[in-house]
Amino acid sequence: MSLLKRLSAAATIAVGVMMAQPPAQAESRTALVIGNGNYSFGRLANPTNDAGDIADALRAAGFDVILKTDANQATMKDAIRSFGSQLKTKGGVGLLFYAGHGVQARGENYLLPIGERPSSEEGLKADGVTASEAVDVMSAAKNSLNIVILDACRDNPLAANLTRRLGTRSGAVSRGLAQVDTSVGTLIAFSTQPGNVALDGEGRNSPFTTALLKSIEVPGLSLGEVMIDVRNDVLRSTDRKQVPWDNSSLTGQFYFKPLPASAATNNPGNEGVEIAFWNSIKDSKNPQLFDAYLRRYPNGSFSDIAKINADQFKVAVARPLAPEPEQKVSLSDPGLLREVRDRLYELNFDPGSPDAPGLKVAIAEFEEQSGLPRTGEASRGLLGRLRDIGGLKPWGAIVYDKGEGKWGMAWDGPTRRTAVAGAREQCKDAKCPYEISFFGTSCGAFALSPAGNFSIVSRDDIQKAKQAALDDCAKRGKACKIIGASCADGTGRATN
């Protein structure tokens, strides 16, 4: 998997949060994000990724974020107290996101810290952290809006052991979480229905967090609509084994990605807002973005193009496999397999070299994004869908060879492959294996320190890309500076 895919969740999300008010009246926003995965009794691969990616999205939205990963009980309780103190001082919008192991005992939900292994209900009370502790500090702050998101129902072997100790008929302990009553102005969302177990997932993020990160990218979706989209996505990706759940007492609309208040209606005199909206989505491969544009501007200047772009992807992935037996035939011809790899690559899925196992992973990721069953198989039907979708453009790329100290940058490429090849030409004899590619209106930046520490990132804005590269590089060394930066279309180019 390339550097681009590993960073994609954090690099491609542009999120905003606001109440249904003009921007000048936007309220303060504070979030506590916790991801625990390194448990001795059942390690989880994704919670720290889930927490980090959600934290990045919320910071981009203007949230002050308290982020804790692999936190023990003392760290979690301190973070909750700090969270409550900030909410009391600033008010506004409060958001809690937790990813990790969770368990309920007699109707109380416990979020399990790292380093604890309670063997009794009393141990849970002594060593765990209850979800109600965080909810209570949010309620006490008298915020206008509180959001609690618990991706905490992963299959937990500790719960099974506790159940055996307390007796299988007691019903005292359950692997799933209990339903929680909400106060006015609060939404509590669970990654699965009360009492059930959620999946940790096979990719970078859990199925629930994957869907959440995707849906909050869509402009103009209210919080309620986001939860509906997340529920449908998770149902598809888990073959209906997992059903996200929420309990809401909201009294107003809430939007993860805002638009100016004047864009709420299709106002013919407000062409600048519509054009800005269109420019922000026109190169996307996400059909939900075009659907959002059409909801706001059903007769807009770009409505015909939006319908074509939205339908192109939907038709390609929804097209029935008929005749089904023929479409499911596995491909063995080297030329067709090479075409599958090339087309996946141009859609930003990285299949790797012909002898690597990455092709199955790339196909499975494509199928998951498309709402298809995950098979990982290169079939005739898959190739037909890929041919229907086409590619993305323009492309930019930045490459680097740490050992040789050489790098290259290219922009305005008609394909990803040509952009990467153009960037590597500047490396001369060096291989420049580190690569990040970006397309449409996205931008990339490369930061380097005299000690050799470096960072290459992609963001939706050239200044954001430069700052993110500097920040990431500075985590490993001092005196970092931007060596090169460009947007995919060649704007914002800079070299040092």
Image (spheres, helix red, strand yellow):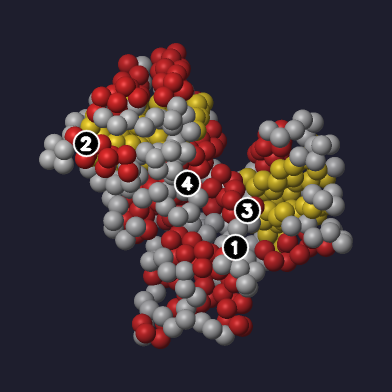
At which x and y percent is residue 2? Answer: 63, 56
> Separation of disc 3 and disc 2 at Cα?
47 Å
**Amino acid at dot 3:** Leu
The residue positioned 44% from the left and 44% from the top of the image is: 44
**Amino acid at dot 4:** Ala
> Separation of disc 2 and disc 1 at Cα?
47 Å
> Reading the chain from its start, which is encountered first: label 4 or label 1?
4
Q: Are marks 4 and 1 in contact (CB under 8 Å)?
A: no
> Mark 2 or mark 1, which is nearer to you?
2
Nearer to me, 94 or 493: 94
Query: Where does label 2 land, which residue?
Result: 165
Query: Where does label 3 land, which residue?
Result: 4
Query: Where does label 4 land, which residue?
Result: 45
Query: Mark 2: few, some, or many residues within 10 Å (few <14, many ≥20)?
Result: few
Query: Where does label 1 land, which residue?
Result: 350
> Reading the chain from its start, which is encountered first: label 3 or label 1?
3
The quadrant in which the C terminus is found is top right
> Mark 4 or mark 2, which is nearer to you?
2
> Mark 3 or mark 2, which is nearer to you?
2
At which x and y percent is residue 486? Answer: 74, 49
Q: Is residue 418 left or right of residue 62?
A: right
**Amino acid at dot 1:** Asp
